[in-house]
Amino acid sequence: MTTPLSFQVTVDCSEPHVLADWWAETLGWQVEPSDPDFIRSMISQGHATDEDTTTHRGVLVWKEGAAIRHPDPDAGPGGRILFQLVPEGKTVKNRVHLDVRPGRENAKDVVARLVERGATVDHEGRQGPSTWTTLLDPWGNEFCVG
């Protein structure tokens, strides 16, 4: 018998902390808090440098990434998304994307709120009785609401 594995989804981006904030608000999740004392300790021990850090919303954070987490600690696998800094911009369609499932009765309202917050509608999809809207987050990453 194989032991189940946990996982996280990782999103490459140019502004990990800003994108983490946007997605945390979108999903009703929480940005994982930074520990400035730990970061300073890593710098003082020579494991990191000041160049490895930045300040976001007045808090010292690691420059390379930010993560969000489902508010229920027992949410299980997939309850974490990491946003990591990469130097290149997005050039092609994502091969993996998130499906946000607010329920059929709430989908149009959720799409409208996301567009107000900077998402862009890419297209409407339909397969049999199922419908969804594919959107782009403010950094161009595709995701579906349906």
Image (cartoon, rainbow, N blue to C red):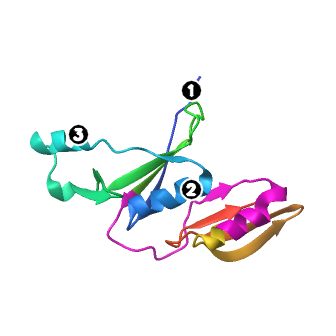
In the image, the segment drawn in magenta is 84-113
Q: x and y percent of residue 145 in the render? A: 71, 62
Residue 141 point in image, percent of width and height: 54, 68
Q: Quadrant of the N terminus?
A: top right
N-term-proximal mark, 3 vs 2:
2
Disc 2: which residue:
25
Residue at disc 2, secondary structure: helix
Q: CA distance from mark 3 to mark 2?
A: 26 Å
Q: Is residue 56 above or below residue 28?
A: below
Amino acid type at image mark 1: Thr
- Please name the residue that numbered disc 1 is placed on: 2
| Nearer-the-camera pick, 138 or 125 | 138
Residue farthest to the front, as pictured: 58
Of circles 1 and 2, the one toward us is 2
Q: Is residue 116 magenta?
A: no
Circle 3: is it few (<14), some (14-19), or many (20+) Cα within 10 Å? few
Q: Earlier in the sequence, mark 1 or mark 2?
A: 1
Q: What residue type is disc 2 on?
A: Glu
Front position in the image: 108 or 143: 108
Q: Are marks 1 and 2 in contact (CB under 8 Å)?
A: no
Name the residue beneath numbered marker 3. Answer: 37
